Amino acid sequence: MTRGKRRLFHVAAFMFLCLAWAVSCSRNEAQQPCSDPLGCVTIAPGKPVRLGVIQSLSGKVAVIGQDQLRGFELALEKRGNKLLGREVSLLVEDTGCKPEGGAVSALKIVSDPAVLAIFGTTCSADAATAAQVMTEAGLSMISGNNSAPFLTSIGGQKAPKWQPGFFRTAPNEEFAGPAAARFAFEKLGLRLAAVINDGDIYTRGLTEGFRTEFERLGGKVALSATVNKGDANMAPVLEAVAVTGAQLVFFPLFQPEGNHVLAQARKTPGLENLVLMSDGALIDQSFLDAVSSAAVGMYFVGPTPPPQGPEVAALTAQYVQKFKQDPPTDYWLSAYDAAGILFAAIEKAAQKGPGGSVRIGRQALRDALYATRDHKGVGGLLACNEFGDCARPSFNVLRLEDSSQGVKGLKANVVFTHAP
């Protein structure tokens, strides 16, 4: 073999060894086992980030579920509709605001191993069932609307339905019931009340919070009643309220049950002077359209909205431009924040893999969510605590003076604020 041929042979052999080493290293890296205790999601080059969405997109609560999805879409649009430099693919499920809908929707989503996390839910009862499925599958879920105390914490302790990996930017309504109670006792001077729930964890949490605080202050809850979802005849429960002589009834119900309580209370003998109070579920234009002037004089307790500064104004303008209507609720803003927290955590937990792939550990993503501090939300800085609550509690009591002014007029008439 000539000297030139030997040189070419050595160069070729060297290149072959380098290529074999590179392939071997790449193969070893690709086959490196996931060390995350909950497993990993590996996104191949060119593949999208896959996220689950669980919301109530049908029924009476659909307007809130749709607003949650719109807040999510605006947050994603802020990032150019991409995460980790990739397109985002959504697996969307509708719960119908039913606990069984939450479980079924979550089961469908977690059956896809490519789904990284879940955005949802709308209703708290759905969240309780969905969060259990989500947790057992090792995923994380964040909501911009769930607010029942039972989902995160009560009195600084884990609540009955707490699940690791569940987060929310809606304030814990552990403080909404007490806000209503303090207003009734301290500002209205009332001492005898009744409460009505519909049996789910959201409404029970609010009425229990009201009862505890009202009685701590020195008042008495003479009746704690439950109606069924779907009930239209509220005469029996309202007659029971009349018998007690209650001065106020607190009924944090959804539509249509809340509509029926209001309409029939206005016609029940003995309740002409009864003070009526509900919660944020009825701070909705469709409710005011349905009940009209019957709601005049009624009180509502709901989360304090973000200050109406330049950022909220700019976001609202984007909302109107994109969806061709004014926002029907304020809850899309907390959805926007929830999506922003999730996206930031995904970016923090992601690790580059071989060949342009990305790997995200499921526990690493949970840890990144729990570690959220000083996240710039539309209403201020947000931080997630060990129970998954990421928003500071603050609640307003509103009074409806003129039904013709709609939700905008109602929200403007703040008569009390409770921000523990």
Image (cartoon, grey):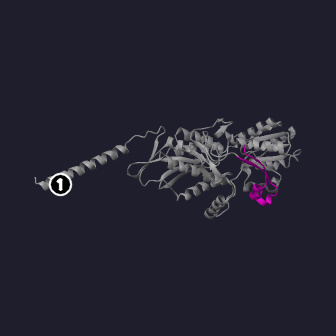
Q: Position of residue 259 (x, y in %)?
A: 77, 50
Of residue 346 and residue 107, the one placed in the foreground of this image is: 346
Specify whether 42 is left or right of 187: left
Say whether residue 24 is magenta. Answer: no
Q: Position of residue 239 (x, y in %)?
A: 84, 41
- The residue at 64%/61% (across/down) is 314
Of residue 356 and residue 106, the one placed in the foreground of this image is: 356
Specify whether 359 is left or right of 320: left
- The residue at 74%/58% (across/down) is 408
Q: Which residues are magenta?
A: 394-420
Specify whether 170 is left or right of 351: right
Q: Could you tell me if residue 371 is visible in this image?
A: yes
Quarter-wise, where is residue 292 in the image?
Answer: bottom right
Tell me the kind of residue under disc 1.
Leu
Give the structural element (helix, strand or loop) at label 1. Answer: helix
Q: Position of residue 8 (x, y in %)?
A: 17, 54
The furthest residue to the left = 1
Q: Residues within 10 Å of mark 1 (few under 14, many from 20)?
A: few
Say whether residue 415 is magenta. Answer: yes
Q: Is residue 4 shown above or below 17?
A: below
Of residue 358 and residue 115, the one placed in the foreground of this image is: 358
Specify whether 343 is left or right of 183: left
Q: Could you tell me if residue 255 is visible in this image?
A: no
Q: Position of residue 265 (x, y in %)?
A: 83, 47
Residue hosting label 1: 8
Quarter occupied by the C terminus:
top right
The total number of labels drawn is 1
